[in-house]
Image (cartoon, helix red, strand yellow):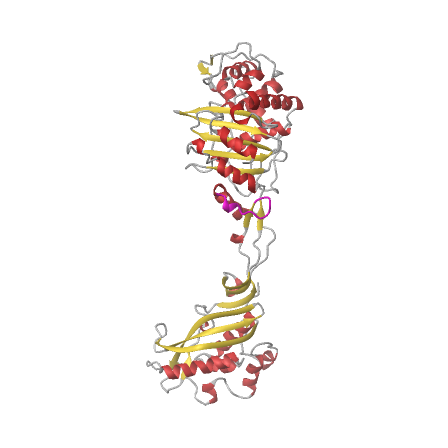
Amino acid sequence: MNTGVKAGIAGAGTALLVLGGFGAYNIVHGLASGTTGGSQASAGKRFDPAAVSSSPPSDTKAVKATQAFLDSWSAQHLEGAAGDTDAPSTAAQGLQGYADGLHLKKLTFDEVVAVGPSTVTPGATKVTFNVTAQMAGGTWSYPSAVAVLQSTGGQVAVHWNNSVLYPGLGDDQSLTAGKLPADANTAKVVASDGKTDLAKFSSLQDIAATIRKNATPAGGSTDTGVAVTNAGGGGTKTVKVFSKGDDPVIKTTIDAHLQAVAERAVRDDQLGGKAAGTVALDWTNGHILAIAHTGADGDIALNGIKSPGSTMKIITSAALFDQAGLTPNSPAPCTDSLTANSQSFHNDSGVRANLSATIAQAFTVSCNTSFIKDGFRDLVHNGDASALHDEAVNVFGMGSWSIGGGVATTDPSIPSDAQGGDQAAQFIGQGKVTATPLFMASVAATVRNSGFHQPIILPTQQQVTAPRTISARTAGYLQTMMRNVATSGTAAPRLSGLAGVGAKTGTAEEGDHTNGWLTAYNSRIAVAALVEGGRSGVDSAGHVVRHLLTGS
């Protein structure tokens, strides 16, 4: 930004000779001719600031004095104008600083009117007028005013302070024109298209504000105009804009169309107004494409830390395949109930007992007892129940993620030291196991991509990696099983008929109610949804997920 110059006239005459631009000739000329400026000086009647009358001058005298001051100022006779004030030296510096700071080309005044005694300066008459300043960037017009004093000898003078230059201008302030300083708060946080402002989406307003504070914008151009600058150039305030620049932008990974779909999805009438949260990812790279939520508890899409119910069976199955050597065809008897570590477990209503069920069949109908039986038998050894935790960390990247821009997320949790009934409950996503829609979307993405990509919302954000890539064998097993869930299993009422979709439903008990979950993927995205109070995953979260998978 151009910094205003306050040029002084005190000092050697040679210093004045180098002054260029508006008013320089007249300052030098005034000193060389032996005058000290203005109409008062040329008449030999200097105003004595030490002998100010308590009676304000008449309106006629005040207007005449003001007009003389303005005429000299307008004609570039800055020394003459300064001589028409009660502080010629200070006024000369201020007038020259005004001209230099604004790169002034032309200055005119009109509608010079006395409006009676000043309420700010005792013993003065207030005179108002309009200012029109022409400069390189454009034309600036504004109303202004001066206070005119009268001495005991009858001389009159404009009372000088910086507000003569511009109303309210402080003694330590100056005016500058040109490029205005960029305001970081004007940066737009935009979608991946580079133009859609995320603030237009209700679910992303807080996220956009956080990113704006923490991320570095790119591009953009500054406004041009006039600003008030404090001494040293800090604390500027724009008073006139000539041309509007382009706001700098912070580009995110959000897909504007999919975000709009997600906003509608969490408000689907079939949810009955229940709080809902959803996250969609590009499963090829972990880019977050949409985040939407409703409810009074904040962003449950990123921070709704709840038991994920049967969606956890994706990780349980992976652990059975990787650590116990089982396959989808391995036995997993589905009984009506089961007791493990003295805790009784049962299936959701509608799940029929099938003592000859396999893991794949149990996964398709979401039989709890099958996964508790196999998990407790094959993954808990001598009281050590850390296998599920290890699978989640090593293969699915569970941990503390930073998605970028300072946006807060809540970490999932699968305790490595589960005790008592929790050693069994963890395998069906209950007990002390907790997750968010963000994490469960990532779980589905890892299966579809055959590898983990940490979710991020800024494309430049560093992504953590999982210690181990999911094996092609395990990924293939899970893809087949999740496809069966979508076509003929628990997710079929919402997702059957959609090409290339794999899914897993979940219903988690919480206090006196249940929460509905569903995570799924198609050929482009992975998505998860949570509906608080949903009686089943398919009949609540299923509606949200379908919207995102179909893009409508």
Q: Position of residue 313 (x, y in %)?
A: 54, 22
Taking depth in this image into account, of 416 and 335 the one nearest to the observer is 335
In the current view of this chain or complex, which residue is farthest to the bottom? 44
Find out whether residue 350 is within the magenta segment: no
Q: Is residue 48 visible?
A: no
| Main secondary structure found in the magenta portion | loop
Identity of the residue drawn at 46% across and 16% down: 345
Locate the C terminus by quadrant: top right
Q: Quadrant of the N terminus?
A: bottom right
Q: Residue at x 49, y 78 (%)?
A: 89
- Indicate the quadrant where residue 442 lies: top right
Q: Nearer the viewer, residue 548 or 25?
A: 548
Q: How many marks?
A: 0
Q: Nearer the viewer, residue 538 or 329?
A: 538
Residue 4 placement: quadrant: bottom right
* Position in image of residue 318 (x %, y %): 59, 22
Extreme residue toward the right, this view = 472
Q: Vertical placement of 470 versus 371: above or below?
A: below
The percent coordinates of residue 295 (x first, y second) are 43, 36
User: Range of the magenta residues?
Assistant: 191-201
The picture places residue 165, in percent across and down from the top left corner, at: 47, 72
Please tell me whether residue 281 is drawn above or below residue 309 in the rendered image: below
Q: Is residue 198 magenta?
A: yes
Say if residue 157 shows up in the picture: yes
Whether 29 is drawn above or below 354: the answer is below
In front of the other: 369 or 42: 369
